[in-house]
Image (cartoon, rainbow, N blue to C red):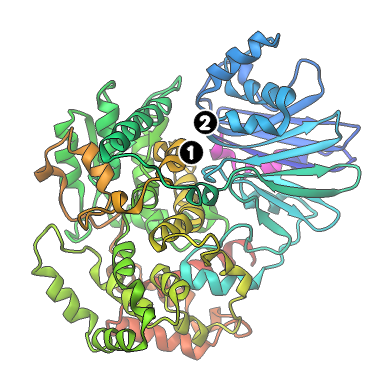
């Protein structure tokens, strides 16, 4: 894992490159390099975290033997040795054992078609001197970030937005249109960013920048929607399970390729336990988890039980107030733009712990989106036909609206373990919002929102533009369950989950790898019939059948809270001062916010209402603004 930067300027200025690299030095503390091409004016810079070929032969920017191509690369191409073998037969010679050189010569030989060969996570930029062109690319799922800034004249790109602040041509003009979406969902979706003229290169896309004409075109080379739209497999469950386990074995084992120690983040849930189970067949591994004193959020004991079953070298750490405060204080620095997922605090803490023993950690993100795991899928799938008759819809609305979330939570607590829901109040509120929707698309949006849009419109003076929510529409006319999984893959997983993990792991120079996001898995699972993915009213049915081969059900079948923190408790207690400091009326911009409404929401939260997500998003935004704009 590394960090890359670049810009075009005929006037050589390597100091700008150095400054842009220095502010994100934690992404690659092992080596640094800069490059300037006098003819084109292209400047390239790179911070290196050494994972493959630890020698100086892996130094970047890497220049081809012919001198016509130069690359800066962040990520890993796990099957690079097989591709290298192919290139060797074509006459290419190599000076390193790194995947960087393989990517560069693959591009030289096959152009943009080389992307179809890569299994991995990657973001890279290649200067093609023959075409007088810059080629920027991001991996299929969007594991690795890549941003670009273009104001019609200046073209700048980087792994993180913060580097743009070190370029004198970057204008720090806030993109206020993103705020309505952020305050509802807690993240800013691609291709947008918090700044004007600054964009995320979308996942599965490449950008070609014509250096002479100063124009560019973005092409989508891979889209998960294409595979969901394909005919479903005509295979029995046994065939699917056998083929699926083979793909999982390949994906997980490929991601252990490294010249440094590798570990696994283990929460004790199905996804991370599956990664641990399959990897334990061939490796003695280190596993890492964190715990909380609050038993509602603490899963350390469960993770420890799973680790013991697989005889891992297990490490656990209980996060305390000091850890929490130190992480929160740095959130706005490491996340560059407002980012509301509070589990980032826990992810940063577990990454810091893991870095003491390993340089690479496998995570299990994508399991819910691939294997049909989120509880909202089942609630919404059961209720999605309510829009067929107004009588049915109104009857359910009346019933749900009469139930208070506190009463619903009490009822949930007396249910058997196998059907009891965790974080139930939050889920119940989302369900109520969903059932009160006008149509299916709106129902899914409301169930996916942390905050009710009506609450956002009360305090935010800027409305939500339609272009920001168009991507939620079921344009492929998929089965509703498939549509929800596909949408979460493109949005929540990419712009929330993967952003969270990348910044958290990189903050301590730890490489995070995502075996469940191997594109071969989602291409396969997208074609598995819905009635097999969600069978016997059981989420993650297929994943469980594979996991049950390696661990007893009574160990693994337990309610899971997700990677959460006791946010409401902290905001009303240990970090209440942060709320007061950031939501003080004098700190708020009254051209953007209705200050009285925010004070009202704050008072309601202190009185016990479940508004912690909204309060946290406000605090996060204010902290970001103070660090990067003031």
> Could you tell me if residue 27 is visible in this image?
yes
Q: Where's residue 516, x and y in %? A: 39, 40
Whether the magenta-drawn stretch holds residue 23 is answered as yes
Q: Residue furthest front?
A: 234
Q: Is residue 472 above or below residue 203?
A: below
Whether residue 20 sits left or right of residue 354 in the image: it is: right
- Tell me the CA gap for discs 1 and 2: 7 Å
Asked if the residue under mark 2 is in contact with the one under mark 1, i.e. CB atoms within 8 Å, the reply is: yes
Whether the magenta-drawn stretch holds residue 386 is answered as no
Foreground residue among 462 and 603: 462
**Helix, strand or loop status at disc 2:** loop
| Chief SS of the magenta region | helix
Bounds of the magenta segment: 18-28
Whether residue 331 sits left or right of residue 343 in the image: it is: right
The C terminus - image quarter? bottom right
**Helix, strand or loop status at disc 1:** helix
Q: Is residue 481 above or below residue 387?
A: above
Quarter where residue 425 is shown: bottom left
The structure residue drawn at horizontal position 81% and vertical position 20%, both measured from the top left corner, is: 67
Q: Which mark is residue 360?
A: none
The structure residue drawn at horizontal position 18% and vertical position 32%, both measured from the top left corner, is: 550
Specify few, some or many for label 1: CA neighbours under 10 Å numbering under 14, 14-19, or 20 or more.
Answer: many
Residue for badge 2: 119
Quarter where residue 325 is shown: bottom left
> Could you tell me if residue 317 is visible in this image?
no
Residue for badge 1: 519
Foreground residue among 354 and 226: 226
């Amino acid at each position: 894992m590394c960090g890359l930067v670049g810009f075009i300027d005929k006037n050589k200025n390597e100091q700008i490159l150095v400054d842009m690299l220095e502010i994100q030095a934690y992404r690659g503390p092992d080596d640094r390099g800069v490059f300037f091409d006098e003819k084109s004016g292209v400047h390239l810079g790179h911070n290196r975290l050494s994972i493959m070929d630890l020698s100086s032969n892996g130094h970047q920017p890497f220049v081809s033997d012919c001198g016509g191509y130069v690359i800066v690369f962040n990520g890993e191409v796990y099957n690079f040795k097989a591709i290298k073998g192919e290139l060797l037969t074509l006459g290419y010679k190599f000076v390193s054992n790194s995947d960087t050189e393989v990517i560069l010569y693959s591009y030289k030989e096959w152009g943009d078609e080389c992307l179809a060969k890569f299994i991995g996570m990657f973001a890279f930029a290649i200067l093609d001197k023959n075409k007088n062109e810059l080629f920027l690319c991001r991996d299929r799922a969007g594991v690795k970030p890549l941003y670009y800034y273009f104001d019609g004249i200046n073209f700048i790109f980087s792994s993180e937005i913060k580097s743009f602040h070190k370029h004198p041509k970057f204008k720090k003009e806030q993109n206020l249109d993103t705020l309505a979406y952020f305050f509802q969902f807690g993240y800013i979706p691609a291709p947008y960013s918090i700044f004007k003229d600054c964009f995320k290169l979308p996942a599965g896309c490449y950008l070609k920048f014509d250096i002479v004409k100063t124009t560019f075109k973005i092409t989508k080379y891979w889209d998960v929607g294409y595979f969901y739209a394909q005919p479903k497999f005509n295979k029995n469950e046994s065939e699917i399970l056998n083929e699926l386990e083979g793909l999982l074995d390949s994906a997980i084992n490929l991601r252990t390729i490294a010249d440094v120690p590798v570990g696994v983040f283990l929460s004790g849930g199905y996804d991370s336990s599956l990664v641990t189970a399959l990897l334990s067949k061939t490796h003695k591994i280190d596993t890492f988890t964190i715990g909380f004193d609050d038993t509602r959020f603490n899963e350390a004991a469960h993770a420890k039980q799973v680790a013991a079953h697989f005889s891992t070298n297990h490490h656990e750490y209980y996060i305390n107030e000091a850890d929490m405060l130190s992480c929160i204080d740095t959130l706005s620095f490491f996340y560059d733009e407002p980012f509301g997922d509070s589990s980032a605090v826990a992810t940063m803490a577990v990454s810091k712990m893991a870095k003491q023993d390993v340089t690479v950690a496998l995570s299990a993100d994508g399991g819910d989106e691939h294997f049909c795991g989120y509880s909202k899928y089942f609630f919404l799938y059961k209720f999605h036909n309510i829009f067929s008759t107004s009588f049915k819809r109104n009857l359910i609305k009346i019933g749900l609206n009469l139930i208070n979330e506190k009463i619903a939570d009490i009822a949930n607590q007396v249910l058997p373990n196998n059907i009891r829901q965790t974080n139930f109040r939050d889920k119940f509120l989302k369900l109520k919002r969903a059932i009160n929707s006008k149509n299916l698309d709106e129902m899914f949006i409301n169930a996916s929102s942390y905050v009710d849009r009506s609450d956002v419109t009360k305090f935010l003076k800027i409305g939500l533009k339609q272009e920001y929510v168009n991507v939620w529409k079921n344009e492929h006319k998929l089965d509703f369950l498939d549509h929800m999984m596909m949408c979460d893959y493109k949005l929540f997983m990419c712009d929330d989950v993967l952003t969270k993990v990348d910044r958290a792991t990189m903050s301590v120079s730890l490489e995070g790898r995502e075996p469940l996001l191997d594109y071969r898995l989602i291409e396969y699972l997208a074609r598995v019939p819905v009635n097999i993915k969600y069978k016997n009213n059981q989420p993650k049915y297929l994943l469980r059948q594979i996991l049950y081969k390696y661990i007893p059900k009574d160990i693994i079948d337990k309610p899971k809270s997700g990677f959460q923190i006791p946010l409401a408790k902290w905001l009303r207690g240990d970090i209440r001062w942060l709320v007061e400091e950031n939501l003080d009326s004098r700190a708020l911009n009254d051209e953007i916010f209705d200050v009285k409404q925010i004070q009202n929401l704050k008072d309601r939260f202190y009185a016990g209402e479940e508004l912690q997500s909204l309060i946290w998003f406000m605090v996060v935004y204010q902290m970001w603004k103070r660090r990067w704009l003031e």
